[in-house]
Image (spheres, rainbow, N blue to C red):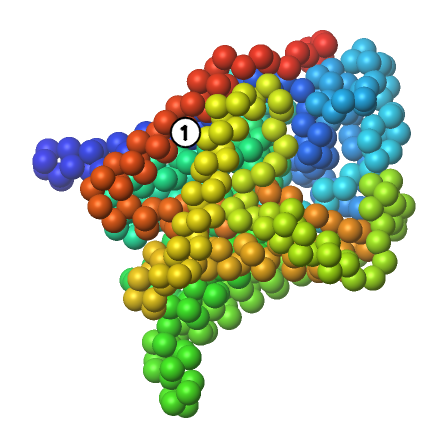
């Protein structure tokens, strides 16, 4: 390789590095500022990560362990009205914790937790971090930043201008669903990465003739990280159908080889994701040692039968993932300028998806991606509540973070609107302002205090 080629490769890599570092900065700053344990089941997620890094796979009927309980006791939990046991308690009792200390995270596959646990253990062992929690949170920040970088790569493959692609991908960092997940221990932090990888694999399957087995792998990965990542596989399956000539060819009763290939790909990516998810749920159910119905959280939300129609069509359910921006975020991280930017960005992305739906055609792949994202988000959230309520016997609302694997498609939708030089400049500049504002906010925000440092 000559010097000119080397310089060209370095220049090509610089935007990727910049996007990654900016996204990583948000996760790391949130991790540093947010010192308490998150009320979004972080105790259970941390316990899962700790146990699997020690070779122990948790199950329904398991109780949270000493390491995770000690973290919450010494840091406190970000939940008004709930007091964790004193940090210096000699022997912590799971009954002193929410849901009587039952481990409720086992329905999630172990993929994310294995990575978080190993990184948490390694960083703690070499002395870079003082606890499992900090190392596991770093892993969440890392894979969130990778996810945003892969979204940037997806936009570049769709021929989006570099500046606009960087700004559009970094818009995600204003969403509470992304910010909170990037700085806490949760498998939701992997969802943007999963969604981007599935979309990229699907695009390469169409444009570069990628082998069918890679779509199968993408589907398996989606199902192996978290149940809700089925949304990414469903969007990929719908995209492959919508971008084909299946409908006119079916009317003529003659399918071309390419149409058959796309239909097979559609069935493969979703089928593999669904099969992987169902397999894990069967394994988890078979390993249960208690009836999950006795867990206080499930008793509180117990519901028999189908959820009522007025619940399913209520905007906070039916439009919860349009786009999937909403989630818990500590009040210290929600000053009015950030709320304004979040609201504006949410509106822009939702509107862009609708515009893509109105303009979509089979040859414009970016428009197809944006339209598919909007469709799956709109119908997926009430369907999620319906299926989950029937399966678990509890009435479940589709939280914003559950739809994060669709976020890359909403970014594609907004990127398609930059058709002129002025439009591309506006998108790029706006995205950089958004991520810059979030970084500054996290730098000056008041941190949650820790009563006592975790021992040892």
| Residue located 30% across and 66% down the image | 363
- Who is closer to the viewer here, 432 or 137? 432
- Who is closer to the viewer here, 141 or 121? 141
- Who is closer to the viewer here, 200 or 221? 200
Residue to which mark 1 is pinned: 434
| Residue located 40% across and 61% down the image | 358
Residue 181 spot, x, y in % from top left: 57, 34
Q: How many labels does the image show?
A: 1
- Give the structural element (helix, strand or loop) at label 1: helix
| Residue located 38% across and 84% down the image | 249
Look at the image and tell me whether residue 128 can be seen.
Answer: yes
Residue 199 spot, x, y in % from top left: 42, 54
Image quarter hosting the N terminus: top left
Q: In this view, does 304 lie above or below 156?
A: below
| Residue located 72% across and 9% down the image | 452
**Res 385 → quadrant:** bottom right
On the picture, is 308 further left or further right than 376? right
Residue 393 spot, x, y in % from top left: 82, 55
On the picture, is 106 further left or further right than 404? right
Q: Callout 1: few (<14), some (14-19), or many (20+) C-alpha neighbours within 10 Å?
A: many
- Who is closer to the viewer here, 443 or 282? 443
Image quarter hosting the C terminus: top right
Q: Is residue 204 above or below residue 416?
A: below
Residue 336 spot, x, y in % from top left: 53, 23
**Res 42 → quadrant:** top right
Look at the image and tell me whether residue 123 can be seen.
Answer: no
On the picture, is 238 further left or further right than 392? left
């Amino acid at each position: 390789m000559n010097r000119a080629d080397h310089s060209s490769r370095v220049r090509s890599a610089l935007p990727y590095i910049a996007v990654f570092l900016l996204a990583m900065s948000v996760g790391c700053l949130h991790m540093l500022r947010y010192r308490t344990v998150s009320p979004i089941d972080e105790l259970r997620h941390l316990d899962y990560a700790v146990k699997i890094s020690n070779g122990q796979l948790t199950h329904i009927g398991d109780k949270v362990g000493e390491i995770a309980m000690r973290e919450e006791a010494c840091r406190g939990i970000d939940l008004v009205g709930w007091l964790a046991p004193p940090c210096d308690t000699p022997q912590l009792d799971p009954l002193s914790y929410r849901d009587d200390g039952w481990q409720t995270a086992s329905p999630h596959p172990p993929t994310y937790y294995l990575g978080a646990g190993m990184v948490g253990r390694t960083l703690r062992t070499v002395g870079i971090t003082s606890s499992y929690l900090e190392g596991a949170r770093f892993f969440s920040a890392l894979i969130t930043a990778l996810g945003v970088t892969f979204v940037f790569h997806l936009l570049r493959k769709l021929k989006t201008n570099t500046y606009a692609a960087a700004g559009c991908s970094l818009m995600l960092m204003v969403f509470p669903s992304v910010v909170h997940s990037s700085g806490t221990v949760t498998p939701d932090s992997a969802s943007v990465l999963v969604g981007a990888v599935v979309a990229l694999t699907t695009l390469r399957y169409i444009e570069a003739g990628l082998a069918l087995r890679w779509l199968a792998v993408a589907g398996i990965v989606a199902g192996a990280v978290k149940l809700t990542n089925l949304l990414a596989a469903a969007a990929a399956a719908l995209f492959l159908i919508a971008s084909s000539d299946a409908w006119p060819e079916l009317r003529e009763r003659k399918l071309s080889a390419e149409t058959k290939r796309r239909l097979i790909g559609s069935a493969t990516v979703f089928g593999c994701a669904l099969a992987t998810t169902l397999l894990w749920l069967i394994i988890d159910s078979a390993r249960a040692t208690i009836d999950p119905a006795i867990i206080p959280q499930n008793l509180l939300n117990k519901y028999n039968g189908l959820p009522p129609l007025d619940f399913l069509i209520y905007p906070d359910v039916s439009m919860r993932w349009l786009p999937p921006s909403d989630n818990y975020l500590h009040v210290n991280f929600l000053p009015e300028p950030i709320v304004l930017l979040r609201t504006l960005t949410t509106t822009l992305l939702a509107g862009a998806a609708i515009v893509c739906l109105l303009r979509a055609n089979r040859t414009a792949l970016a428009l197809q991606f944006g339209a598919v994202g909007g469709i799956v988000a709109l119908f997926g959230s009430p369907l999620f509540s319906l299926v989950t309520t029937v399966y678990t016997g509890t009435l479940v609302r589709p939280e914003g973070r559950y739809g994060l694997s669709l976020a890359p498609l909403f970014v594609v939708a907004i990127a398609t609107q930059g058709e002129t030089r002025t439009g591309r400049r506006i998108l790029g500049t706006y995205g950089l302002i958004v991520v810059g504002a979030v970084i500054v906010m996290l730098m000056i925000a008041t941190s949650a205090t820790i009563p006592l440092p975790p021992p040892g």
